[in-house]
């Protein structure tokens, strides 16, 4: 197996050698071999690991990419794949929410797909139930209410918040746009547009921008999957070589 220097790995990705050492320190690539000279010696295993980590970080985020590499480093392939699966599941949920919002806009503006964005929920959600559905905290939903994004009714007997179907739609839209990096005041304005069926130009622009981001994330996940598969192949080959 060819020996590589830290600079070889760094040059491929336009990184500094210190960045490569930091990724090793953080467990994102395997530990380097240390001969008597004390200098780090990397191999194709390390190069493949770095390619995989950087692709995973672009697709899933730095922290999640690190979790995947840590799981692989611990020999927990199923755990690593489960983290990857959660990322794909979230992307699918985002796409579904985006389409639901598009349908809601069409319904409110009399567009060609004028139909309810989603079936009416059989009963309103409590704040804890809606938070669980969206994988958020109740405190986040209360913050969104204070920002004017949500306006749930209150149960007359208990005073508890009750989120109806339209509130669920607004919450899912807010969650989608927050992941897209939009500030709360912008989201509140977009939600008001849907509620009042007013001008939709800004909303359409936001949805198109988020559609583009989802496509970019999907492509990044494809690349990350290929890089991860390549890393696993190199690991498997290395184990087979050592067994001979």
Image: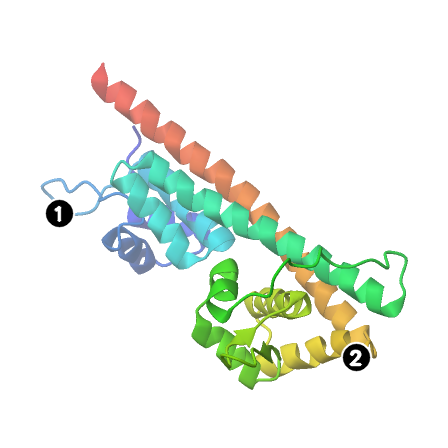
Position of 12 compared to 147: left or right? Answer: left
Q: Quadrant of the N terminus?
A: top left
> Which residue carries the number 1 mark?
38
Q: In the picture shown, does residue 215 fall above or below 36? A: below
Q: Residue at x 82, y 76 (%)?
A: 197
Q: Residue furthest front?
A: 157
Q: CA distance from mark 2 to mark 1?
A: 68 Å
> Under tag 2, what secondary structure?
helix
Lower sequence index among marks 2 and 1: 1
Q: Position of residue 133 (x, y in %)?
A: 51, 59
Task: Give whichever of 177, 171 is nearer the camera.
Answer: 171
Position of 32 compared to 203: left or right? Answer: left
Q: Residue furthest top?
A: 244
Q: Nearer the viewer, mark 2 or mark 1?
A: 2
Image quadrant in which you'd find residue 21: bottom left
Image quadrant in which you'd find residue 180: bottom right
Q: Residue at x 50, y 39 (%)?
A: 225
Task: Give whichever of 170, 190 is nearer the camera.
Answer: 170
> Under tag 1, what secondary structure?
loop
Position of 187 compared to 70: left or right? Answer: right
Q: In the picture shown, does residue 174 fall above or below 6? A: below
Q: Which mark is residue 198?
A: none
Q: Position of residue 177 (x, y in %)?
A: 61, 68
Q: Quadrant of the C terminus?
A: top left
Residue 139 appears in the figure? yes
How is the model colour-coded?
rainbow
User: In the rendered structure, are the residues bearing label 2 and label 1 in contact, judged by CB atoms less than 8 Å apart?
Assistant: no
Q: Residue at x 56, y 41 (%)?
A: 222
Q: Which mark is residue 196?
A: 2
Task: Give whichever of 17, 78 is nearer the camera.
Answer: 78
Q: Position of residue 128 (x, y in %)?
A: 46, 67
């Amino acid at each position: 197996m060819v020996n590589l220097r830290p600079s070889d790995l760094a040059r491929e990705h336009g990184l500094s050698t210190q960045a490569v050492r930091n990724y090793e320190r953080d467990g994102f690539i395997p530990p380097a071999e240390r001969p008597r000279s004390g200098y780090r010696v990397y191999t194709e295993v390390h190069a493949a690991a770095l390619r995989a980590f950087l692709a995973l970080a672009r697709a899933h985020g730095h922290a999640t990419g690190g979790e995947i590499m840590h799981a692989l480093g611990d020999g927990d392939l199923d755990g690593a794949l489960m983290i990857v699966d959660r990322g794909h599941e979230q992307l699918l949920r985002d796409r579904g929410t985006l389409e639901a919002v598009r349908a809601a806009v069409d319904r409110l503006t009399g567009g060609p797909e004028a139909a309810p964005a989603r079936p009416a929920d059989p009963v309103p959600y409590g704040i804890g139930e809606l938070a669980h559905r969206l994988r958020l905290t109740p405190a986040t939903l209360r913050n969104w209410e204070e920002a004017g994004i949500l306006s749930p009714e209150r149960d007359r007997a208990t005073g508890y918040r009750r989120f109806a179907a339209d509130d669920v739609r607004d919450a899912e839209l807010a969650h989608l746009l927050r992941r897209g990096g939009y500030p709360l005041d912008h989201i509140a304005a977009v939600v008001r547009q849907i509620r009042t069926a007013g001008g939709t130009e800004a909303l359409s622009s936001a949805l198109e921008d988020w559609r583009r981001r989802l496509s970019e994330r999907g492509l990044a996940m494809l690349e990350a999957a290929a890089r991860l598969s390549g890393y696993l192949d190199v690991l498997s080959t290395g184990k087979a070589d050592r067994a001979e």
